[in-house]
Image (spheres, rainbow, N blue to C red):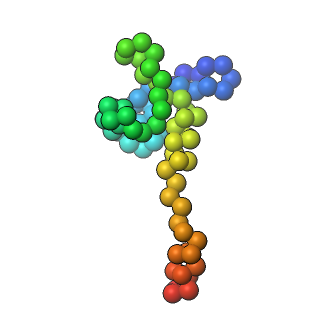
């Protein structure tokens, strides 16, 4: 992990993968498919993920359960 200034934390692919609980291979595949979290490319072979972007991506994966379904499920129980 590299800290730039006071607020920016950069992670390598293996560090980002560990942070997300997945393999580096998954992140490489996602980059090739242009999906997954945003990343920074510095020169040809220097890739980094900003911790802030990883956190935003995680938040964006939230699946909201429909309140109506929640109430219905509670009524059944």
Residue 22 left/right relative to 7: left
How many marks are shown on the rendered structure? 0
Front in this rendered view, residue 28 or 24: 28
Q: Residue at x 50, y 58 (%)?
A: 63
- Quadrant of the rendered structure where residue 5 is? top right
- Quadrant of the rendered structure where residue 45 is? top left
Residue 28: % across, % down: 33, 32
Query: Is residue 6 among the parts visible in the rendering?
Result: yes
Q: Residue furthest top?
A: 43
20 up-or-down from 16: above or below: below
Residue 63 left/right relative to 22: right
Residue 16: % across, % down: 45, 34
Residue 73: % across, % down: 52, 80
Query: Is residue 27 among the parts visible in the rendering?
Result: no
Front in this rendered view, residue 52 or 21: 52
Residue 42: % across, % down: 45, 15
Q: Residue at x 32, y 35 (%)?
A: 33
Q: Residue furthest bottom?
A: 76
Q: Residue at x 48, y 23 (%)?
A: 40
Front in this rendered view, residue 66 or 17: 66
19 up-or-down from 77: above or below: above
Q: Residue at x 40, y 30 (%)?
A: 14
């Amino acid at each position: 992990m590299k800290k730039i200034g006071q607020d920016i934390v950069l992670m390598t692919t293996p560090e980002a993968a560990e942070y997300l609980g997945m393999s580096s291979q998954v992140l490489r595949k996602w980059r090739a498919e242009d999906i997954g979290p945003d990343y920074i490319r510095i020169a040809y072979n220097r890739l980094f993920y900003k911790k802030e972007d990883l956190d935003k991506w995680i938040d964006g994966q939230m699946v909201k359960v429909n309140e109506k379904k929640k109430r219905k499920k509670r009524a059944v129980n």
